[in-house]
Amino acid sequence: SQQGEEDPQALSIQEGENATMNCSYKTSINNLQWYRQNSGRGLVHLILIRSNEREKHSGRLRVTLDTSKKSSSLLITASRAADTASYFCATRGGGSNYKLTFGKGTLLTVNP
Amino acid sequence: GAVVSQHPSRVICKSGTSVKIECRSLDFQATTMFWYRQFPKQSLMLMATSNEGSKATYEQGVEKDKFLINHASLTLSTLTVTSAHPEDSSFYICSASSRRTVLDTEAFFGQGTRLTVV
């Protein structure tokens, strides 16, 4: 079963605007990761945030994690047309449960 | 980051035939490999987890006799879709991790294989 649920399912913005995507999950986690997928391609890792972290930055990306609400957000600032892709959150369980479970994803379209 | 190579990127096969997809870790020892399936505009569904030298662990609802997984070496895992049918048409993606990093770091993904069964 799916662990993560992203919203919105689709997001269309203009170049230069910020894009925010949210992810909720159901069980305890070791870490939460965000991935990007261009159409018909493999996944590219963007950022990993551990369960004891609350916020992380990487370039134009900012990720937050609220374990009390079991939710995370991915903010892409100053978006570019090249950011157009699907974005997935994925959770890694704790203990021996090292499976990576993906959410349904958000399709981001950045219009030039 | 580590490099995972998946081959072929696209394959078209006739119904009833078998297709083998390879997943190789090029610059690290992949003690654990994961196989996912993705339908159009949907998320990745984990099919099975394989550890080098042991039998794969399949997720509920995945037919182990239909989707044969072999992880015979630390750099290669294969997924064979046996007696393929049109409903097996999908995008298959592998990812690889080492024992040291499987819990705490990112996963490294192959480029994916688009399988079309006609």
Image: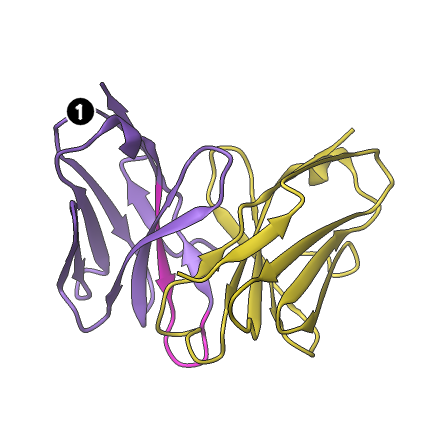
Compared with A44, A80 (above or below) is above
Closest to the observer, B75 or B61: B75
Compared with B24, A16 (above or below) is above
In x, y percent, where is residue B81?
A: 76, 50
Q: Chain of mark 1?
A: A
Q: Which chain is purple?
A: A
Closest to the observer, A62 or A67: A62
Would residue A55 appear left or right of A37 to someone viewing this image?
Answer: left
Q: Secondary structure at mark 1?
A: loop
Compared with B73, A91 (above or below) is above
Residue at image position (46%, 44%) is B43
In x, y percent, where is residue B79?
A: 70, 56
For the C terminus of chain A, the image quarter is top left
Direction front: furthest residue: B27
Closest to the observer, B67 or B80: B80
Q: Is residue A91 rendered magenta in the image?
A: yes
The quarter holding residue A96 reads: bottom left
In x, y percent, where is residue B98?
A: 49, 74
User: Which amino acid type is marked by label 1?
Assistant: Glu
Residue at image position (36%, 69%) is B105
Circle 1 Cα neighbour tier, 10 Å, few/some/many (<14 / 14–19 / ≥20): some
In x, y percent, where is residue A75?
A: 17, 44
The quarter holding residue A110 reads: top left
Residue B22 appears in the picture as rendered: yes
Q: Is residue B61 rendered magenta in the image?
A: no
Residue at image position (84%, 35%) is B15
Q: Which residue is mark 1?
A: A15
Q: Which chain is yellow?
A: B
Would residue A33 appear left or right of B116 to someone viewing this image?
Answer: left
Instruction: Give, as a single range, the part of the protein colored magenta.
Output: A87-98
